[in-house]
Amino acid sequence: MEAHHIHPELLKHKVRVLVVGCGGNGSAMAAGLPYLHQALLAYGHPEGLHVTLLDADVISPTNCVRQPFSRSEVGLYKSVVLANRLNLFWGLDWAGIPEHLDTNRRLDGVDIVIGCVDTRAARATIAKCAEEWSEVDYWLDLGNNADSGQFVLGEPLNRRNRRRGLRLRTVSELFPEVIQTEMDGDDLPSCSAAEALDRQEPFVNPTLANHALALLARLFRYGTISYHGAFVSLSSVGGAQGLRVDPKCWARLRRKPRLPSQREAKIGRFSLIS
């Protein structure tokens, strides 16, 4: 089985993380990143993480149903609220920026970008910013539907990540449809609590985020991983299927015009591993 080895410079200095999107997945990732920061320090990392949260959205009453916001915070920026909360509790100096990512923004000083967005247009923007002249080491993408989702850790093809056989393919390389903006449908916010829960079960975001955080923790602790993502389902026991570090698997996935279904993942049609 092939393995990926962490970029060695990430073990020598503060790891600069940018979280794009502070909704369901983004807020769950933000809540877990301080634990990863503490774990890195305990493992002997010299400085741990510095995290910037980027999102221009404000908190709505519907967000208070399955996202970690309260009624008293309605109308405030999600990114600022989350950053302030984490800083007060953990004694950190992380940043919350109430802006959207656009293609004019250079991702300077970013080692890992974590995409927690829910439109193809937003993913396409991340892909554009992380590729070409960027020096981003990794792009970790999270996405989900009502009761399942996936996360993929990739190395964007840019000045830092050169073309090579075992370069971790990004979500947009494995599943090109995720950045085809013409396929974006109705992404209007849910207008009621009931509708919000119909569109998405309440625990899918933290479940997906915890799996993604566990992958990052293994990468930093052991310096190597044999899988770089997974497909996660709440509808079955043990419903997580890993995505191998395997060029043959990547080639098969790229020939598919869509993300694999949970049934296909379970029967191994895409060379997934548990």
Image (spheres, helix red, strand yellow):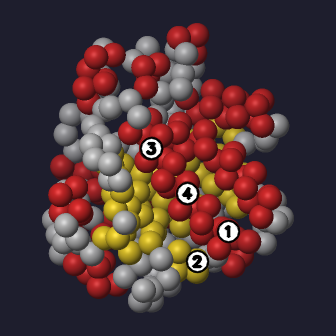
**Residue 172 or 87: which is nearer the viewer?**
87
Q: Which mark is residue 214?
A: 4
Q: In which quarter of the image is residue 83?
A: top right
Q: Quadrant of the C terminus?
A: bottom left
Q: How far apart are labels 4 and 1 at the CA level?
A: 10 Å
**Residue 138 or 45: which is nearer the viewer?**
45
Q: Percent x, y for residue 31?
A: 61, 39
Pointer 3: residues within 10 angstroms few (<14), some, or many (20+)?
some
Circle 1 residue? 221
The residue depicted at 41 percent of the width and 34 percent of the height is 203
Q: Percent x, y for residue 158?
A: 50, 75
Per the image, label 4 sits on a secondary structure element best described as helix
Circle 3 residue? 207
Q: Which of marks 4 and 3 is nearer the N terminus?
A: 3
Q: Which residue lies furthest to the bottom in this view?
A: 165
Q: Percent x, y for residue 144?
A: 33, 45
Pointer 1: residues within 10 angstroms few (<14), some, or many (20+)?
some
Residue 101 in sight here: no
The residue depicted at 51 percent of the width and 33 percent of the height is 56
Per the image, label 2 sits on a secondary structure element best described as strand
Mark 2 in CB contact with mark 3 (< 8 angstroms):
no
